[in-house]
Amino acid sequence: MFLNLKEDNPDIPAVLIVFDHVVSSNPEFKKTYLLHGANAPQINGTRTVLKRTELGYNGKLVNDTLLPKADNVKITQVGEHPDEFWAGDKLFKTFPYSGNNAEQGGIRTEISPLTPSEEDYFLNVMQVSDADSQIEPLQATLIETNTHKGVKIADRVVLFGMTKEKIASDVTFNFDGDGEFKITVAGLKEGTWEVKKDSSLIKDAVVTESGTIAEFKGESGNYTLTYKNENSVREKVEVSYEYIEAPIKIRVNNFYVHTENPFVENGRVMVPLRGVGDALNAKVTWNEE
């Protein structure tokens, strides 16, 4: 689930929460969550940090692993160089794909539970920011109930159903914190749900068949969601957008070069020479004469 935080958190404008439920008939089957990056990760406990500063990049991704929990997780780096792409015990050398806009991953981070089990849950919270930012990442707090698992981060609370089945039984959870939170509960049966906080009804939430999500706002406390009826029709929301033409992009050896945007003048594409030269490790000088 993608969270847009840039209005209130310009230094950490976005968070991506990834939840996985994996079941295998053989408990000894190794379940692994993979995170590929162009550079080597910095692994500290349950936190993995990926940075990119070459070719004009200034990006950082911080991944906090909440599940498996700290006492039951192993996080390891696989590969030593950005052009190494391991799949199991086989190494594939990466190479540019003609016409492909995606940059290839290289060094891999593997996240696996230590204890064999038929059933495992993975919950990873990814935050993006500038690589040179000194701002501390937002705290991500695990929330667990008998039906859902999720996270509280910034002014958001997100809960995922523990199975693929949409449930109609009561959902109860609680969290602490100051101010108003935007709350999202997934994995619900389509219909109208009563939302109660500290035993008081605060609203009805409509869950659609395709979305399976209830959304509402509220302060910290004890919440209970109860299925009310089969009405799953929401009021229509008008959405407007503005088409923006994508800029011309430069790529060297399958990696984008972040520099001044190229532009078209008199039918010719004008490219900033210094940015391309630096990416090619060429010496670029300027002669005023």
Image: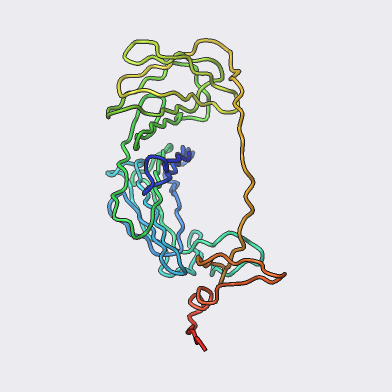
Q: Does residue 249 sit above or below 34 in this rendering?
A: below
Outermost residue on the bottom side: it is: 289
* Total numbered circles: 0
Q: Which sits in the foreground, 95 or 15?
A: 15
Residue extending farthest front: 289
* Residue 262 x %, y %: 59, 67
Q: Which of 151 and 9 is in front in this view?
A: 9
> Taking 281 as reference, is 35 above or below it?
above
Which residue is situated farthest in the right direction here? 267
Residue 161 picture location, percent across and down: 46, 29
Q: Is residue 124 above or below residue 102?
A: above
Residue shown at 47%/69% (left/top)? Answer: 55
Which residue corresponds to the image point at 49% horizontal and 83% vertical from the top-left?
A: 284
261 up-or-down from 281: above or below: above
Query: Is 75 or 5 nearer to us in this picture?
Result: 5
Colour convention of the picture: rainbow
Q: Residue at x 53, y 15 (%)?
A: 192
Q: Position of residue 81 (x, y in %)?
A: 43, 70
Q: Where is residue 261? Give x, y as percent.
A: 56, 64
In depth, the one of 189 and 88 nearer the eye is 189
